[in-house]
Image: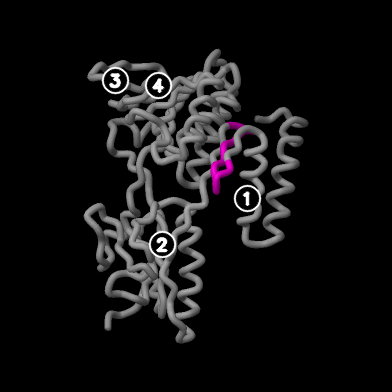
Amino acid sequence: MDVQQVVLEDKTVLDYDRLILALGGTTPMDTVPGAAQFAIPFRSLSDAFRLKAALRRLEASDLDKIRVGVVGGGYSGVELACKISDRLGTRGRVRLVERGDDILKTSAQFNRETAKKTLELKRIWLDLETDVESVTANTITLVYKCKADTLPVDLVLWTVGTRVCPLIDTLPLARDPKGFLTTNSCLQAQERPEIYILGDIAACRDAAGQLVPTTAQTALQQADFCAWNLWAGLTGRPLLPFRYQPLGEMMALGIDSATLSSFGLNLAGPLAYVARRLVYLYRLPTLKQRVNVGLNWITAPIAHWLTGSP
């Protein structure tokens, strides 16, 4: 039997009986010249702090117009474009760049159509079937139908793609052709049943044999099954195969608007925004966290209004 140990970066060695791998993914920034140096990804908390600092710096400048390019027409790109447009108001010039022929290709039709209408209302310029050729400190070069156009820009946000965490390349575990770690339906690594794999790094087929999407919704459901299977495996009970249940989707479309499609119910606008927040509060694990987050949501707009801060 293989040695069941984890070696940390500082060379600390941890023995384990069961191991859960949920390392998440990274945003590939090396596909376009200049993207890694000049664009800001949006995946981690540090990315959010970088974006916040960049927006404050631009808002404090003497620029008449603030030009923002958002690369990627998926969920993150659309949500970012809408919120930044609301924050910058008439001063903002937001451009959403998508290499495909439509935004939100995997989204429900209601949400996709609502998002497109919202982008139009917020006067967010939408570039479809457009590639990014390069990014510099103050320009972005776009290619549409083999014609390149270099545009001035003050900020570029990069939301394109997911790459599995490079750490898993060093692990002696089975993977699929795309580099994702393969699991059985109980979320266990192939030939290593003491290891469970969840989230963005997993190529997981559920009990019905379908390859499940690598989304936050999937990861949350996997976590519940993983917790049960850990307990079951340690107490001699049968493991439960993962059963993915699509619960619909929600998207924020600005500061006080959203779209929601779930179990045949479609909502848009402020009502969807409130419903989305209530769902997020419900998903928080403790009552204390729900109260703290809820109070923050209520008081933050008042504090911003009193202080005049964005």
Disc 1 residue type (three-letter): Val
> First in sequence: mark 2 or mark 1?
2
- The residue lying at 49 percent from left, 64 percent from top is 223
- Distance (Cα) linking label 1 and label 3: 40 Å
Query: Which of the two residues, 50 or 94, is positioned nearer the viewer here?
Result: 94
Q: Is residue 39 visible?
A: no
For residue 144, the mark is 3
Asked whether, in this view, residue 303 is left or right of residue 109, the answer is: right
Q: In this rendering, which labeled residue sits more in front, label 1 or label 3?
A: 1
Identify the image quadrant of residue 125: top left
- Distance (Cα) linking label 4 and label 1: 39 Å
Which residue is disc 4 drawn over? 138
- The residue lying at 32 percent from left, 21 percent from top is 141
Asked whether, in this view, residue 22 is left or right of residue 120, the answer is: left
- Distance (Cα) linking label 2 and label 3: 38 Å
Against 272, residue 289 (above or below) is: below
Q: Are marks 4 and 1 in contact (CB under 8 Å)?
A: no
